[in-house]
Structures are given as C-alpha cells and as structure tokens.
Amino acid sequence: MASDDSAAVTDAVTDGSPPLEAPTEANSAAHSAAATGAPTPAPPVDPRTQLRLRSEGDYLTLLLPNPLQAETEGGMLSWGELIQQFKQRLHGSEPFWQPHTVVHLAARDRLLDTRQLQSLEDLLTTAQLSLKRVITSRRQTAIAAVAAGYSVDQLAAEDRLLQSPPRPGQPLAEPLYLQTTVRSGVEIRHPGTIVVRGDANPGSSLVAEGDILVWGRLRGTAHAGSGGDRDRYIMALQMHPTQLRLADLVARAPDGPSQQYLPEIAYVGDNAIRIAQAQDFARQHFNATLGQGAQPTDAF
Amino acid sequence: MTRIIVMTSGKGGVGKSTCTANLGMALAQHNRRVAVVDADFGLRNLDLLLGLENRIVYTALDVLAGDCTVEKALVKDKRQPTLGLLAAAQNRNKEAITPEQMKSLVAGLAKTHDFILIDCPAGIELGFQNAIAPANEAIIVTTPEISAVRDADRVIGLLEANDVKFTKLLINRIKPKMVQEDQMMSVRDVLDILAVPLLGVVPDDERVIVASNRGEPLVLDQQLSLAGVAFNNIARRLLGEEVPLIDLNATHDDLFSRLRRFFRG
C-alpha cells in the first residue's frame, strides 16, 4: 500500500518550493487537508536554552544555557523563568538517578551569584540530589561558588570567535521521559527524544531534536527534529495539535473537531507533513523495509 | 491545622472575589473561624462584595509598617462574627509588598483561624506570586469558556511548580441550558483539559450581581438561590463532607424542552 493512505495536512514548505497538492486519493475524511495561511519557516531552535540534567555515569551534570548563544538568538530568559522551567521538568520527569547522587554544575559563561547558586541547590535538594562541584569560566562565579563551599573548576574563558558551531552528526541526548500533564505556557526543549505520559494541553510546546511521543492527547504545539532532521516522527494516542513542526516544515491541524480517536503518526513525506493512523503506518513502513523481498500471496 | 487556600484563575472577571466572599461567609456560617485576605493591592474589591468598605480602618500595609497588629486590622463582619477581612491598600500597587511579607501576614493570622482564603489578583505577575506564596491549597476558579480554561491551565502549571500541591477546581457561571444545547463547554469538557479534582459547579445567576451591589453574599439569603446552595455545598465539601453535585438541569428541564430536544434529534 502506498502513501495515499494518509492525508496531507499542509502545503507549507520552506525554500520557496512550490506548494504541493494534496493527494487526490486522500481518503480519510477525519483529516481533510488544511493548509497553513502563510508558509512560515520554523525558527532555529537551540535546546540548550533550558537547564537540563545529563548522566555522566556515577554523577550528573547540570547544564546551564550559554548566555552567548542565547544572546544571538535574541532574548535571554530571566533567571526566574529558567528556574521555573527547570522545576516543571524536575516535577514531571521520572528520576533516572539514585537518591543523593552528586551533581556537577556546568555554568559555562554565565554569571552566578550566591543567591542563584543557593536557589539551584534548594531545587536539587528537593529532587534528592546534591550539588558538589561548579565548573565555570567566570571569575566572579568561581568566587561565589568557593564562598558557598563547592569545589570549583575554573576553565579558561571561551573565545567568542573560536567557538565553533555544533558539529553535525553528534549523537542525540538520552530520551526525556515525562510523566505529567504538560500545561499551557510550559515549554519543554530537549536535544533528544521526548516521551510524555499524559496530555500535552493547548498552549504547551514540545521541542525535540529527536522524536516526540505523547501517550495521551497532543493538543499543543510539537516540533520534532528541531535540529533539521526530517526523518523524525510525532506520535500521539490522540492527535489534536495546535501546530505540528517537523524539522523545517510547519503544519496545522485540520479545522473542526475530529471524532476519531486512534493513535496517529506525523511524518515527512513528499516535502510535507502527513498524518497516518499508527497501524497503517506500521504496515506501510514494514512493507517498505521488506522492499523487493518475498510478498505473501493469496495462497497463504 | 489552619488551611490556607488561595483563590486564583489567571483570567480576570471569572468571579474569584465573588467566590471568595461567598465561600468565606459559608464557612463562617458553619462556625469556622475564617479570615479572607484581599491580595489585590491597588484594585481591591473584596470589601465591597462583603459590604465592609466603610469599616476598614487599617490595611495590610499598615500591619507591615508596624502601625497595628494583624488582629486589629482584621475587619469583623457584623453578620458573622467568625468572619474577618484583611483589606488590601487601595492607594498602592502590587509592588508595595513582597511574597515574604505576604507569608508573614498570613502566618500572623494562622494562629487564630481555621481557614484563610486569599483572593488572588488576575494575571501571573508579582501580585499572583504574592498571593500564592503563603498558600498550601488552591481553588482554581474558571468559567466554561476556552480563554478562561486556557489561563486556568497555565495557572495550575505554575502552582505545581511553586509547590502548591492541592489544587481543586470550581467552575463558575455555567448555563445548563446552553450546555444541553451544545453551545457551551460542559463540566466534563473542562475537566477533560484541566485534569484536577472538581470542587463544585456554580450556575450562572443574575442574583449574584444584585448581591454584589448590595454587599451581601448570596449565602446570607433566607431563601437560598441555586447559586447560594452551590456555594454552601462547596463549603461543606471543603469541610470534608460528601455532598453530591446539584442537578442543574432539573429546574428548566420541563416537558416543553424535552419535546423540543426530542424533535430536534
């Protein structure tokens, strides 16, 4: 079975390529084709603008967003907002660490004062983590950290000019598993795959360099493959998104309430985002991988 | 153990202050010592709804300045002496007070009261941060409109992130007739999105406006209106009683509307 099984959702394509026609055989009435008003390219997203924890074997590293990077993207989040986002992530995520695991704080170029260090430590303590080491390239931050009694690694300042853009082909971070309702106003960014067990409500946004899997209702905005990888998928038990983005493509959901409550998958096909029912998609995909191999015949 | 409850919504005009006034009064009628705290500095109106405007001598700011004790600033209600109001200052704005000061104010009231209801201002800025700082429970007030529900959802997320663990939902101003005709979000639709326990549903009632203008909360009426009964039930649920939701459809579900529905399919 070919891809005419699925309905095209959008014709919004970047790079000025001509808008695609919706496949004429699109048979699913539940998602009639709906084009976005103006083709808007998805803005470049850097998942490092949020605080996140990374496992390093026997300890965790808490990565702070780099202020230089944030500056060039226009608009740095305030400390309060960063902490708020981090709290929401900590609340929702399944702890992948043992109690009393040691945390190293990678503060990079960011200036931190004693109060900010204290607020981080308080937050980590509630998650049963203990902050022990601060890695920074700023003298003031190092002094504040020493005064607060942490071990300090002071690195040479990163040169703005020598900073190379992230190399292509880097492995993605480990998946982020959230067990929560992602509510309006909450934004989850992750340089890997995001798995949500719960609903993503309208007004929320999920941005992942990998895939997005919502075991519940997806009603907010989801952006998979934010690093530019079109070979990514957005999967949901109920797909009612405000907007879907895959790499540089944008699509919005068809108007009108859908009566269909079947698991669906969004993927990129023919330069546009398409949605297929999960079961059909799996079958298609399976056939595709079989390629020219043996096909079951009527005899079976 | 004093229960410190913040009444919040995100969106303005959904009935936070009306609900605070009525719930405070209803709890006081059940012989609980209740303090209602207006956290809406600069735009206070809880005093109007309770009809206590002309009895305010000291405000929360006078307490913080050390001009009087918190007990002295509390305006006792003449109808229900177990109800007290701590008024906000009208001539200042939200920046006049910090979350820490709010905590200390409420801590001063906690010793002598069973319930403290904090009337939160609309929005999610400093006024909101102030109001939720001392609370350990929250009642989200929303109306069945998508803008109000969206804002409520955001506020629930913020409350979770700020360690207010017990959040319950109060759906205000529902019009059963419109719900039946599928023109308004139903209670189920709202719960579907917000996914928090339901505390109660208050029907839309014109008498609420009359009561507000008179400064006499609905629950004081001799002959309770449907909204008044709803508020009373919510107060009882807060006290731990199991009270079933009132059947809002019963009042106007007469033969005619049934026939109409029947013929419309």
Image (tube, coloured by chain):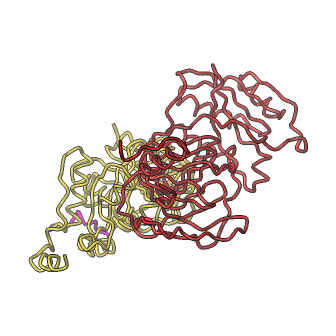
Between residue B124 and residue B42, name the one nearer to us.
B124
Whether B158 is drawn above or below B10: the answer is: above
Is residue B254 placed above or below B106 in the rendered structure? below
Residue A48 is at least partly visible in this image: yes
Which one of the lettered chains is coloured yellow? B
Output the letter for the chain in red: A
Q: Please say if A293 is above or below B44.
A: above
- Answer whether residue B104 is visible to the viewer in this image: no
Q: Nearer the viewer, residue A176 or A139?
A: A176
Identify the residue at horizontal 54%, vertical 61% (top origin): A243
Instruction: Locate residue B191: give its quadrant.
Output: bottom left
Q: Which residues are magenta?
A: B215-221
Q: Front-most of B145 and B37?
A: B145
Q: Residue B220: within the magenta? A: yes
Q: Position of residue A92 (x, y in %)?
A: 49, 39
Query: Percent x, y for residue B144?
Result: 35, 66
